[in-house]
Every structure is written in C-alpha cells, then in structure tokens.
Amino acid sequence: MTDKQEKTILSTRDVRLWYGQKEALHGIDLDFPNKGITALIGPSGSGKTTYLRALNRMHDLEDGVTVTGSFNFNGTDIYAPTTDTVDLRKQIGMVFQQPNPFPFSIYENVIFGLRLDGVKDKAILDEAVERSLKQASVWDEVKDDLHKSALGLSGGQQQRVSIARVLAMSPDLLLLDEPTSALDPISSRNIEETLLKLREDYAMIIVTHSMSQASRISDRTAFFLSGDLIEVDQTKHIFLNPQKQETQDYVSGRFG
Amino acid sequence: MDNITKKLMQRSESTRKDTIGRAISMTALILIAIVVVSIFVFVLSRGLSTFYKDGVNVKYFLFGTTWNPSVTDPATKKPYIGALPMILGSFLVTFLSAIVATPFAIGTALFMTEIAQKRGAKIMQPIVELLVGIPSVVYGFIGLTVVVPVIRTIAGGSGFGILSGTIVLFVMILPTITSMTVDTLKSVPRHYRESALAIGATRWQMIYKVVLRAATPGILTAIVFGMARAFGEALAVQMVIGNAALMPHSLTTPASTLTSVLTMGIGNTVMGSLQNDVLWTLAMILLIMSLVFNLIVRAIGRRGAMK
Ligand SMILES: Nc1ncnc2c1ncn2[C@@H]1O[C@H](COP(=O)(O)OP(=O)(O)O)[C@@H](O)[C@H]1O
Ligand SMILES: [Mg+2]
C-alpha cells in the first residue's frame, strides 16, 4: 500500500454488540478505504465474525442481538430506521465460510440476485454470468457446464461461484468470513488469487484465521482480541512492527 | 512384545459384543423380511386366483362398472365383479383430498417454520402431532355427525359420498403432510437462507425462491405419504362415503372405495369362494398401490439427491 490519500467507504465508531446480556464487541472504531483488502485477524471467539455480520445487518435475523455505535457507509447510516436492509445487502455483499451455492444450476446461482431485481433480459443475464464468473476466476472451468447443478462442483469452485453470485450484484463492498477455511490448500490459493485480482476494483473485508493468508493478500490488517480492536495498520506494520504487545504475541504465534 | 502379539491375536471383548449385536439385528431383519414376503405371497396367491382359478378376465375385472358378486351376470355366467367403481372412488378421494390438503399444509408449515417459529413450536407443533395420533374412527365419527349432515343440507341427497369422504380424508392427511413438510423446511440448511438474504432477497423471496425450491422433493414426498394414507384409509371413509358400489357420477351421491368394500365384505364371504377371492384381488390392488407410492417416494428421493 502506498500512503496516498484514499476515500473511505465505510467508517464505524464505538461499535458495541450484545448477544442477550453478553457484550461481544466493546467499542470498535474502524475505517475502510474504498479499494483493497482489509484483513480481520484474531483468535477464535475474538468477535471478528460478529463485527463483520454487523456491517450488513445480518444480526437482524437473530433475536436478542443489540447493536449500537455509528456505521457510516458512503454517507448513509447503516442502522438508520429508514435504511432498507434489502438494498443495503445488495451493496454490501457477503461470502460465507462454507461454500454455499443454492441447489440450482451454476447459471441460476449467479443470476439469483438479478432475478430478484426482476431482470429478465437474457442478454443482460448472460453477460452478467460471464462477467461475474470471469471476475471470480472460475469461468474457464465451468463455462461448458453452466446449466448443471452447482452442487456438482468441487468445494473451491463452489466458493468461487458463491463469490460470482455476489459480484453479479456489483456490490460496493465485499465481506468475506473465512472464505477458505473449509477448502484444501490449492483451492485456497485459487481463492486468494481471485481476491488479489478483485482488489483493484473492490473494497473487501476478509476475516481470516490464517496469519499467512492475511500477510499474503491484505493491504491493511486489524487485530481483534476478546471483542476489542487492539490495533489496525498496514499489514506489513502489523506483522513486522506491531505497536502493541498483544499483537506482537499473536503474530509471533505465542498464543491463539 | 509377546504379550502385545498375544493380545492382538485374541478376540477382544468389544469385538465379541459387536458380533452378538450384529447377530441380533440380523435375526430381527430376517424375521421382518419373512413376514413381509409372506404377506405378499399370501395376498398375491389369493388375489390372483380370481383370474387363474375362477377364470375371470382381468380387463373385465378392472374396467367392469357393475359390482355385485352375489348376482350372476346372465350374459357371462359370472358374477358381476367390475371393480372400476371402487378403483375410481379410491383414486378420487385420494387425489381430491391431497389437492385440497397440500396448500393448507404448505401454508401451515411455512407459518410454523418461517413466520412464527416461536408460536409455531409452542402451539402448532403439539396440535399437529395430536391430530396425527387421533384414531381414524374418531375422524369418521365426526364426519358422520357433522360433515354428512352439512353436505346433505347444502347439496341435498343423503350427504354420503365422495365429497364427504374427501373432506374427512383432507382433515386426516393434513397433519401428516404438514408435519412432514415442517421437517423438510427445517432441514433446509440455514446457509441457504442466510446467503439469499445476504444477496438482497426479501424474506418472502427467500422463502419462495430458495427454501421452497430446495424443499420441493421433501414436500412431494410428504404429499405422496399423505396420499398413501388416504388411499389405505378404510374406517373413516367407510363411515361417510355411503358404500354403494356405483360409478361415481357426482361427488355427493353414495360411492365406495377399495377399502370400504373390502372391510364391509370380508366377513360375509366364504374362504375360497369367488366372492371371497375378488376381495383378495381388491386387497392386492391396495398392496400394489402402496408399493407404487413407495417407489414414487424413492424416485423423488433419488432425483432430489442428484440435484
Ligand atoms: N449467536 C451467538 N449468540 C451468542 N453468543 C455468540 C453468538 N455468536 C458468537 N457469540 C459469541 O461472541 C463471541 C465472538 O464470536 P465470533 O464473532 O464468532 O468470533 P470469531 O469470529 O472471532 O471467532 C464469542 O464469545 C462467541 O461465543
Ligand atoms: Mg468467526
């Protein structure tokens, strides 16, 4: 990363989140630039997933979750009562840990979101399928099988189709929660390559349990511990020259 | 070293238990298989004797429209044993009740799993389970005292008939289809729902385009199970359908089903007589149909798994 000034796409302040009575996030302040990859690292249970899911309001689906703090996404408040979660989630795409294509054809998977928007024009749909699958670097492998079930693909291919499905919506921000942890090393590398290519055009936030993955693909890294944000900086600073002792301990493998 | 070798060569306690357990379950399995095979052999040999012993024409039996085994048809010198009225009656009540029950079942199941999980689990679940367990004679009795008089008032006639049978069966199979549909909907992986919503689906779009689609094989299976139950139900239907072995020309005139004729007639005939054999043939049709329902369920399962 260079130190030239960038625009911020998302800025959160004092984010707190409770599961029932239990506070799981204790005031997170984080800014995300509108290009490049930010990695969220930290030991299991440190609140990375919880924070990520707060960003596209996935916690709305659960009972008993309380979120406070400010979330400024491109000038709009994510948690404003007037914010339409359906629109919001079209702009903030999410990729999950488990590759989870629907039990439909590859083609139907990719255009799922467009169909929801009522797009019927075959030319537009075809174009979106090709573009998204190419962006997700899986086009060459599946282009002859577009109308076969996506569940017949390998785990890595399924995950890239899941990414394509999100990209088809042309989101402004992509959230990825440990997208490679269910995959073998080679598929993981493929996903990483894919993300590195997307890095030029998208803002991405990736939760990862793998420090080597964070160091390979991210521009900035945020270190979470027990629901607190300990440190955020350019990735190389976090790994080579962290400011906090906890960060130092974690990246040198002394706990976690 | 030697000790270890000796130990490894010996059969361990757990291996022995394993062997015993396997023997017990194999015995049980073989017993069940014997019972099932005997039932089939018995019903088939009885049912088929109508055709090879009594020399009844299969086509005449399946498509004949007059059923009166105690009276001889002067034209053929054979009793009137056209089973089409009952076959039609059985299929009509089965399909009609399934067609009516399916939308209600899906609606109830969606309410229980997607819209009001808490209330669904607390109130609806016990109700549905209770309904599944009610003996069919109770349904039949309620049909007799409530449904039949209402139909009589509205449509005239006696009130007995296909319509009353359909209504009673509808109530009977509704909980079956509903509870199976609930199970299917619950088994749709959570991540399908999450990723649909994460992509910007509304709740209804998620249900309609993902959950129901993923659950289709399971829902079809539930419907077929309901149909199998309706097809095989005897008592409740017999109490409201009128038991007249006539071609069903209207939904509100007395009719009959395979099961109702069977249960009404089986005690009044002499074993080995033609009158008795034809009842076994009806039983054979029932058995074959339940086999067919089973095969359909399996075929759906296989197609569903392939997707
Ligand atoms: N649905 C939930 N209900 C209650 N507690 C939860 C829930 N999800 C996560 N937690 C708790 O919140 C904390 C943070 O979890 P999580 O965000 O999943 O951590 P990470 O993704 O960093 O492993 C953990 O203590 C976890 O037990
Ligand atoms: Mg996590």
Image (cartoon, coloured by chain):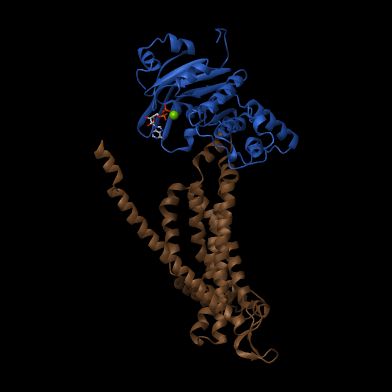
Chain colours: A blue, B brown
Residue A171 seen in the figure: yes
Is residue A10 placed above or below B113 in the rendered structure?
above
Dividing the picture into quadrants, the one containing residue A203 is top right
Number of numbered callouts drawn: 0
Res A36 quadrant in image: top right
Whether residue B159 is visible, yes or no, is no
Q: Is residue A176 above or below residue B94?
A: above
- Residue at horizontal 57 percent and vertical 60 percent from the top: B295
**Farthest residue toward the left?**
B3
Q: At which x and y percent is residue B291?
A: 55, 65
Residue B204 percent coordinates (x, y): 57, 44
Quadrant position of the C terminus of chain A in the picture: top left
Tell me where residue B222 appears, x and y as whole percent: 53, 57
Report the residue that reaches farthest toward the bottom: B74
User: As rendered, which of B130 and A153 lies closer to the eye?
Assistant: A153
Furthest toward the front, the residue is B2
Which image quadrant shows ligand 2?
top left
Q: Residue at x 68, y 92 (%)?
A: B74
Q: Residue furthest top?
A: A3
Quadrant including the N terminus of chain A: top right
Would you identify the image quadrant in which residue A117 lies? top right
Front position in the image: B289 or A11: B289
Q: In the rendering, at what x and y percent does residue A209 appear?
A: 44, 24
- Left or right side of A93 for B62: right
> Which residue is nearer to you in this view: B50 or B193?
B50
Relative depth, front residue between A107 and B123 = A107
Above or below, comparing residue A239 to residue A179 in the picture: above
